[in-house]
Amino acid sequence: MKGINCKGKLLNLEEPVVMGIINATPDSFYEGHLKSNTDEIIALAGKMIQDGAAILDIGGLSTRPGSKPVSVQEETDRVLPVIRAIHHHYPEAVLSIDTYNSEVASAAVNAGAGIINDISGGELDEKMLQTVAALNVPYICMHMQGTPETMQQSPAYANVVKEVLDFFIAKTAACHKAGIKDVIIDPGFGFGKTIEHNFQLLKNLSVLSITNRPVLAGLSRKGTIYKTLGKTAAEALNGTTVLNTIALLNGASILRVHDVKEAIEAVKLFNAYKKAP
């Protein structure tokens, strides 16, 4: 798959692209990205677009380890004003809604989002796949063991790479059966995985190419980086760039990041490296 159709906006994935993270939440594991009002979020969106982001991913529900869910109404109230405002100011921008609720996804697409990014791969809302198909938008299907509230309570696998691959083989078939045209897969770094599991997945990321789907890598400022380095999330930008580069070398098509400028530089250098004779 060389490109995806985001409600009439074609996104070329022949070369890797960058997705900027926009949190419409009062909490996040990385406090440097929390914005208190819509004007600040619009400014952040504008900077990300200027820095080269191909997608802006907007979420109204914290999914950090131990986080508790909020009501559909509260999540909708958080994301819709943000999506509408960004869509109004930057109508050509490709917006993604980061949610595992089909009602929120539907409202967000109607407000201007063109991609649905579901951390549960449809596991937390049985209506999600049919909703995505009816909306006719691309679907980012992520692997997660457990729920955000429980996922880091002793996650275990016999073989994490095989189990994640098997999950995607089954899920992409289910997506196809539901009528979803464009599917992107995300191994879910940090979602029900230990640091060792995350590094195993990163090292073997190219295995996911068996599914013939674009792969999204969401490593930005996560515990795998800052805990390994003995730092904080605020100090994890350099480590993020290192692991993003490894992800690119192993076949990632989309980098989901807090820091767009640095990720774009990694992509540019990767492209130059790849083209060298």
Image (tube, rainbow, N blue to C red):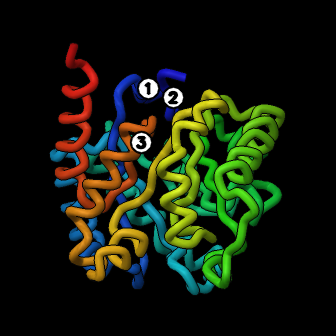
Which secondary structure lies at badge 1? Answer: strand
Residue 131 visible, this angle: no
Ranked by sequence position, the earlier of labels 1 and 3 is: 1
Q: Which residue is mark 2?
A: 4
For the residue marked with disc 2, what is the amino acid? Answer: Ile
Name the residue located 20 percent from the left edge and 18 percent from the top edge.
Answer: 276
Of labels 3 and 2, earlier in sequence is: 2
The local crowd at label 1, few if under 14, some if 14 to 19, many if 20 or more residues have their Cα within 10 Å, is few
User: 70 or 12: which is nearer to us?
Assistant: 12
Q: Which residue is mark 1?
A: 10
Element assignment for label 3 = strand
Mark 1 vs mark 3: give the one in front: 3
User: Helix, strand, or loop for circle 2?
Assistant: strand
Whether tag 2 and tag 1 are in contact, CB under 8 A, the answer is yes
Q: What residue would you read off at disc 3?
A: 254
Amino acid type of the residue tagged 1 in the rendering = Leu
Figure check: 235 above or below 101: below
Three-letter residue code for mark 3: Ile
Q: Residues within 10 Å of mark 3 (few under 14, many from 20)?
A: many
Residue 20 place in picture, x, y as percent:
33, 54
Q: For the residue carrying disc 2, how many other residues have a C-alpha within 10 Å: few (<14), some (14-19), or many (20+)?
A: many
